[in-house]
Amino acid sequence: GNHTMTIEAGTIIKGSFSGSDVAALIITRGSKINAVGTATEPIIFTSASPNPQSGDWGGIVICGKASINTAFAGTGGGPGVYEVEGGINNGTGDGLAGGGATPDDNDNSGKLQFIRIEYAGYAFQPDKEINSLTLAAVGRGTTIDHIETVLAKDDAYEWFGGTVNCKYLVALKTQDDDFDTDNGFSGKVQ
């Protein structure tokens, strides 16, 4: 937690899939991503495969500290804590989201602007998938706009609780849901 990852406009990041190891970008509670592209220089997250296909890599997961109407019984859990789907949690709780007993609905997990996410989404187990963009208990202090997902294996966008407002979202050729909300998401989506 408490770190910021900065990705410059025009950057291309390639995720891979090798055996049971699947690349995914996880922003843990308390950390931030500052990925701000432009209309002419978007940031592209894509497959490392020479013949890319839907599901080649995991996608982007942002874990915030905002409200979520669920509880996690495992280590570091309790009411208001969620274990993100997809098998990304570990012994230090890097896959947990939510503020627990003291959620921060104004939590800021950074900025995603002018981003394209291609060929993402991975089914760790049935009904336990990573989406192109997973927003888990992300607060309204976070900026998310001008995002495009292409050929998502699971959902293009899935919100688990949280209060983040998002706009200018495009989902192209998604294999499951374009937009999916769970666990009391209360933000606004344009």
Image (cartoon, grey):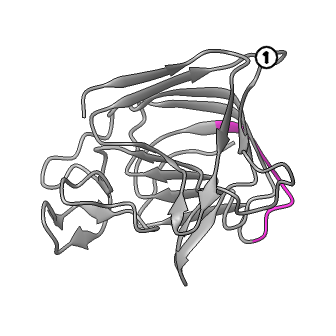
Q: Which residue lies furthest to the bottom in this view?
A: 126
Query: What amino acid does circle 1 point to?
Result: Glu
Would you name the residue on which mark 1 appears?
Answer: 41
Classify residue 168 by image quadrant.
top right
Q: Where is residue 145 in the image (x, y as percent from the top left)?
A: 65, 31
Residue at point 57%, 68% (across, down) = 19
Q: Magenta stretch: residue 171 in it?
A: yes
Q: Report the residue at 64% width, 61% height from top.
A: 121
Q: Label 1's element?
A: loop
Q: Quadrant of residue 178?
A: bottom right
Label 1: few (<14), some or many (≥20) within 10 Å? Answer: some
Give the residues in magenta.
167-175
Residue at 54%, 51% in the rendered image: 23
Q: Quadrant of residue 76?
A: bottom left
Determine whether, in the image, residue 19 is placed left or right of residue 9: left
Instruction: Inspect this view and state whether residue 108 appears.
Output: no
Quadrant including the N terminus = top left
* Prevailing secondary structure class for the magenta stretch in the rendered image: strand
Q: Residue at x 43, y 68 (%)?
A: 85
Q: Position of residue 71 (x, y in %)?
A: 23, 70
Left or right of residue 150, residue 24 in this image: left
Per the image, is 184 magenta? no
- The quarter in which the C terminus is drawn is top right
Q: Is residue 60 above or below residue 95?
A: above
Q: Where is residue 60 in the image (x, y as percent from the top left)?
A: 55, 46
Q: In this view, does 17 lie to the left or right of 30?
A: right
Count of marks placed on residues = 1
- x and y percent of residue 49 in the render? 77, 50
Of 148 and 142, the residue lying toward us:
148
